Image (cartoon, rainbow, N blue to C red):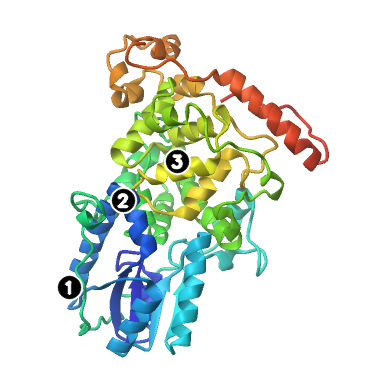
């Protein structure tokens, strides 16, 4: 008997760790709610609701196969050693984590299990292609996305769907109660967290909105993105499954050129998740340190007089505020608006990217520290986006370009719900002035703050790169 420890891989389909365990004998499915998971779920009630719903769906799927999920609470090494001894299991298999803290926890767990005489195996499940499969050398991955993507898309995507070979044990070990949403401060479990919902959403997206992804992915008022991040984060959908499904769509000879381009761009966005995972795998220090060593001493602030205004969505810049309010209300923010809101924090306010990551972590449903750090460092100009100067988004221009009628802004900012835009693009920048009594004026002057930041950035970076070339830009 082999224990398969479920973590953030809450499904039975296309599951690398489960397939690995099944190759060695009957599988005892287990879940350990340890201190780290408990803390993460308590930080975000919506995350806790999604997790509880996903675990419930996993247990139901196991019961349909004559088994059930064995739940334990406590630190993973002690809980799993005890479970192995109680059940007579000869080994434990689980899915790897990619953030620095998670990777260290995996190493500690492996050492504890092996010391207790229990075979331990940690396998890659979250990425479509594991870091070592694509690495340029045994001890180093890619630091730039484009060459990584060229290599990534040339490799085959494995499948771990082996229903005939799966043999689940009928657990005799006692189990604690399934994790409930209320245990972590949420009101009830999410009803849309099951793998079946993830597959339905993926297929609906590929049949519909994905065909216009190239044009619509930047438009926050349009439902033009997959919104699969929570499912990918908790593993109710395998990234491999999403990649293979997208590749199958691209095989359709009757696709229009724009549809084919859109699907390729969506595939590229899936590859970016793998890219950030391999960055964290080979550079675990990037949990809290910049990937670019030369930028590790650059002084971002931890505080700002208007930091709370940014956190609450009251900066006076409607696109930024709408995104923040959408996140606080739903646990999700449109991807492009995320970039604009993150840029505002790092460059207009000059606040440390880690403050932003920690703030959003309290509201997001998704729970993937490696990808969060990779995205934040990319925006802050200290990570894998190796441009000479950071890209600073102008929030007014972004609104003019991607929400010209103010549909998204008015949806999330009640104070501006009846702003008389009349469809005129030139009126959009005046939104903050429409109802000054209830909606604030801009807390900072974007142009001035962007220029000041870039000057400070250039002064810091030039001696470290041997003399700066070119001119910084504050467009966008």
Residue most extreme to the right? 466
**Residues at marks 3 and 1, CA–CA distance in whole angstroms:** 40 Å
Tell me how far mark 2 sits from mark 3, CA to CA.
30 Å
Is tag 3's residue or tag 1's residue first in the polypeptide sequence?
1
Give x and y (percent) for residue 70.
24, 75
Q: Taking 359 as reference, is 64 left or right? A: left
Mark 3 — residue? Answer: 262
Q: Is residue 20 visible?
A: no
Q: Of label 2 and label 3, which has the lower sequence position?
A: 2
Disc 2, disc 1: CB below 8 Å?
Answer: no
The relative height of residue 19 versus residue 471 in the rendered view (above or below) is below
Label 3: element kind: helix
On-image quarter of the C terminus: top right
Q: Residue 287: which quarter of the image?
A: bottom right
Say which residue label 2 marks. Answer: 47
- Residue 146 spot, x, y in % from top left: 61, 48
Check disc 1 and report the residue beneath it.
63
Q: Nearer the viewer, mark 2 or mark 1?
A: 2
10 Å crowding of disc 2: few (<14), some (14-19), many (20+)? many
- Asked which secondary structure carries label 2, the reply is helix
Q: Residue at x 65, y 23 (%)?
A: 451
Residue 193 can be seen in this image:
yes
Question: Which quadrant holds residue 172?
Answer: bottom left
């Amino acid at each position: 008997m082999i224990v398969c420890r479920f973590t953030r891989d809450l499904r039975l389909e296309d599951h690398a760790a489960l397939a690995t365990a099944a190759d060695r004998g009957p599988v005892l499915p287990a879940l350990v709610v340890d201190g780290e998971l408990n803390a993460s779920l308590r930080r975000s009630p919506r995350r806790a609701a999604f997790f509880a719903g996903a675990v419930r769906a996993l247990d139901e799927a196991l019961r349909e196969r004559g088994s059930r999920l064995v739940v334990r609470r406590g630190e993973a090494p002690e809980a799993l050693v005890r479970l192995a001894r109680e059940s007579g299991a000869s080994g434990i298999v689980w899915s790897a984590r990619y953030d620095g803290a998670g990777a260290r926890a995996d190493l500690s767990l492996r050492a504890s299990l092996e010391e207790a005489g229990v075979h331990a195996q940690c396998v890659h499940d979250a990425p479509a292609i594991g870091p070592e499969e694509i690495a340029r050398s045994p001890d180093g991955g890619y630091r730039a996305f484009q060459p990584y993507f060229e290599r990534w898309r040339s490799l085959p995507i494995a499948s771990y769907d082996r229903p005939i070979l799966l043999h689940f044990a009928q657990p005799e070990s006692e189990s604690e109660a399934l994790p409930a949403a209320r245990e972590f401060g949420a009101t009830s479990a999410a009803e849309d967290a099951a793998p079946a919902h993830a597959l339905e959403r993926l297929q609906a997206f590929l049949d519909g909105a994905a065909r216009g992804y190239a044009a619509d992915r930047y438009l926050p008022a349009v439902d033009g993105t997959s919104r699969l991040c929570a499912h990918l984060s908790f593993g109710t959908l395998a990234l491999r499954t999403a990649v293979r499904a997208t590749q199958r769509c691209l095989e359709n000879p009757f696709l229009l050129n724009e549809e084919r381009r859109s699907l390729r761009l969506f595939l590229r966005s899936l590859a970016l998740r793998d890219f950030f995972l391999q960055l964290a795998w080979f550079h675990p220090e990037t949990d809290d340190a910049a990937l670019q060593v030369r930028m590790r001493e650059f002084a971002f602030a931890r505080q700002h007089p208007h930091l709370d205004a940014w956190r609450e969505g009251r900066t006076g810049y409607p696109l930024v505020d709408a995104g923040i309010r959408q996140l606080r209300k739903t646990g999700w923010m449109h991807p492009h608006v995320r970039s604009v809101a993150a840029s505002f924090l790092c460059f207009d306010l000059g606040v440390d990217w880690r403050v932003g990551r920690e703030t959003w972590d309290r509201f997001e449903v998704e729970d993937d520290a490696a990808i969060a750090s990779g995205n934040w460092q990319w925006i802050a100009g200290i990570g894998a986006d190796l441009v000479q100067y950071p890209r600073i988004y102008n929030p007014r221009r972004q609104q003019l370009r991607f929400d010209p009628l103010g549909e998204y802004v008015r949806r999330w900012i009640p104070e501006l719900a009846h702003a008389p835009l009349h469809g005129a693009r030139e009126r959009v920048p005046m939104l903050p002035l429409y109802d000054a009594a209830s909606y604030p004026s801009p807390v900072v002057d974007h142009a001035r703050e962007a220029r000041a930041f870039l000057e400070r950035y250039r002064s810091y970076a030039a001696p470290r790169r041997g003399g700066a070339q070119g001119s910084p830009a504050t467009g966008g």
